[in-house]
Image (cartoon, helix red, strand yellow):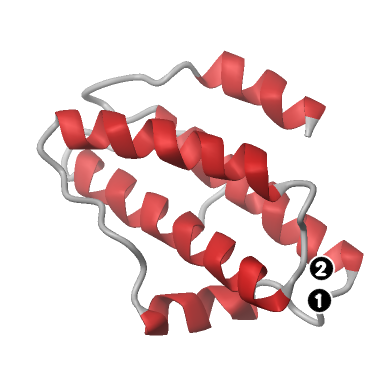
């Protein structure tokens, strides 16, 4: 995942889909590990909104594969609160990057406010 909030115009939509899938895989891994229950509903809400917007551009986001979930699970580290919190923070930044997709901005400022509240 990336801390960048920019998607280059060439291949930007494909990159946005890839980042979206990475966060979806992280949420699935966190669910399986039973961590971050307080943060996951807000992340899921953003993923749902993004999935709808990406579908409007003709992108098939689909669900994460088992291997994507396994890779994302590594981001949860030792499952400590600090490790999981860091992974969720990175996921929010990645969702911000998806929101800056060159074809359809999704309201980054509104989502940053939601992140602060989470």
Front position in the image: 14 or 34? 34
Q: Name the residue at 70% across, 19% down.
A: 113
The answer, for residue 12, to whether it is visible in the render is yes
Q: Name the residue at 46% across, 41% down.
A: 47
Q: Compared to 76, does 10 lie above or below?
A: above
The answer, for residue 7, to whether it is visible in the render is no
Residue 65 rendering spot, x and y as whole percentages = 34, 76
Q: Compared to 106, does 73 lie above or below?
A: below
* Contact? badges 1 and 2 (CB < 8 Å): yes
SS class of the residue under badge 2? helix
Position of 33 with respect to 71 (left or right) is right
Q: Compared to 69, does 11 lie above or below?
A: above
Residue 89 rendering spot, x and y as whole percentages = 71, 48
Q: Name the residue at 39% across, 27% down.
A: 100
Residue 70 rendering spot, x and y as whole percentages = 51, 83
Give the alpha-carbon distance from disc 1 to disc 2, as whole Å.
Answer: 6 Å
Q: Quadrant of the C terminus?
A: top right
Position of 30 with respect to 47 (left or right) is right
Residue 103: quarter of image: top left
Residue 98: quarter of image: top left
Per the rendering, the mark at residue 83 is 2
Per the rendering, the mark at residue 3 is none
**Residue under label 1:** 79
Position of 21 with respect to 93 (left or right) is left
SS class of the residue under badge 1? loop
The crowding category of the residue bearing disc 2, from other C-alpha atoms within 10 Å (few below 14, some 14 to 19, many at least 20), is: some
Residue 49 rendering spot, x and y as whole percentages = 41, 30
The crowding category of the residue bearing disc 1, from other C-alpha atoms within 10 Å (few below 14, some 14 to 19, many at least 20), is: some
Find the residue positioned furthest to the left.
58
Camera-nearest label, 1 or 2? 1
Front position in the image: 79 or 44? 44
Number of marks present in the image shown: 2
């Amino acid at each position: 995942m990336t801390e960048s909030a920019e998607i280059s115009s060439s291949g930007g939509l494909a990159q946005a889909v890839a980042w979206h899938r990475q966060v979806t895989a992280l949420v699935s891994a966190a669910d399986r590990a039973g961590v971050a229950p307080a943060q996951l509903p807000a992340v899921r809400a953003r993923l749902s909104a993004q999935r709808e917007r990406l579908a409007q551009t003709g992108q098939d986001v689909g669900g994460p594969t088992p291997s994507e979930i396994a890779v994302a699970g590594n981001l949860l580290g030792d499952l400590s609160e600090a490790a999981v919190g860091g992974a969720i923070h990175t996921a929010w930044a990645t969702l911000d990057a998806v929101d800056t997709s060159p074809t359809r901005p999704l309201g980054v400022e509104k989502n940053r406010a939601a992140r602060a509240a989470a």
